[in-house]
Image (tube, rainbow, N blue to C red):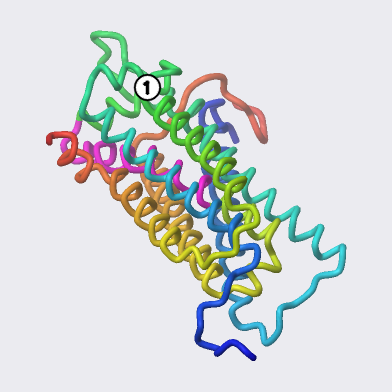
Amino acid sequence: MTTPELEVQPQTGAGPIAAALLSAGLGCFFVGFTNVLAAASKPLTKAFSLYTPSGALSGEAALAVLIWLAAWVLLAKRWRSSSQPFTKVIYAAYALLFLGLLMTFPPVVHILAAL
Amino acid sequence: MEITYRGLITALHGIFFGSLFLMAAFAAVVELIRRHHELSPSELDPGGVRLERFFLIAMALLGWAAVLTGTFIVYPWYRAAPPPGTLDLAAFPRNFLLAHPNTAAWHSLGMEWKEHIGWIAPIVLTMLAAVMYGHRKTLARNPHLRNAVLGFALVGIFATATAGLFGAMLDKNAPVEGGATITLMGAAK
């Protein structure tokens, strides 16, 4: 019996790609989120200043990259042989990416930091 | 023809690493779109695979080179605080821009956006490089996943272009200069 064409097919090898997408989304989210945190709090600005000449940006970027890489390794391991369609994962990855992007835009950062 | 040390490193950061990264990212996106129009998934010979992998690694490395030189070398020069009483702020671009209402937004909007959105670009485009490097066949079989990766790549290009555009405009309004003068051609008279 053949599978109808429109039925969602299991996507062989999709797991590692979904892991790469979700972890990249998470990394981008943390680029923006740490930016908002640093803008909202002077102690956090100081804490993020790992390399004083670059200020808080050094720690914000380092934390985001660390989270991105750690998530990538963990998710890739977890979904290595999974072949589900990952539709929800892709939506979550996009949501994280766009939130991260939004939280890099200074007018939005100022509004969120003032909350 | 002369250039200062800081001017040279800034040019290396923006014009060499940054622009090449943007061009490479654009080429990767064109390749992904091209794959949408293949009648059947194409196979590469070993030389083609090597060339494609070299390109993808170079693209990711250019992105990291741009963002790391920007954050840890050029940005500290840009944001250095002038000693109290300094009247000529030309060597302190951040303070120079903030001192004039007509240029302040180049820092408060341009630089503050650039310094953060710039980090999104290498994260997204390294993911793109890794996926195109290691999962070529899976991508070819799954238009759903290919579209998702393509969307991320377009955001990566937007992030790179935004950082590059503001970098160029900031350098026009308050160039990062200083350090030793390097003579590239001809002797100073």
| B39 shown above or below A23 | below
| A91 shown above or below A75 | below
> Considering the image in quadrants, where does the N terminus of chain A appear?
bottom right
Of B154 and B11, nearer the camera is: B154
Residue visible at 55% across and 89% down in the picture? A5
Residue visible at 49% across and 47% down in the picture? A23
Chain of the residue where label 1 is placed in the rendered structure: A
Residue A41 in magenta?
no
Instruction: Give residue B6's position: percent from left, percent from top.
Output: 52, 27
Residue visible at 39% across and 37% down in the picture? B115
Apparent side of residue B108 relative to residue A18 in the rendered image (left or right): left
- Mark 1 burial class by Cα count in 10 Å: few <14, some 14-19, many 20+: many
Q: Quadrant of residue A72?
A: top right
| B34 shown above or below B188 | below
Instruction: Give residue B120's position: percent from left, percent from top.
Output: 44, 46
Q: Quadrant of residue B182?
A: top right
| B138 shown above or below B100 | below
Q: Amino acid at mark 1?
A: Phe
Of B167 and B30, nearer the camera is: B30
> Considering the image in quadrants, where does the C terminus of chain A appear?
top left
Residue visible at 62% across and 76% down in the picture? B34
Residue extent of the magenta highlight: B100-124
Q: Which residue is mark 1?
A: A48
Instruction: Give residue B84's position: percent from left, percent from top.
Output: 25, 8
Of B178 and A38, nearer the camera is: A38
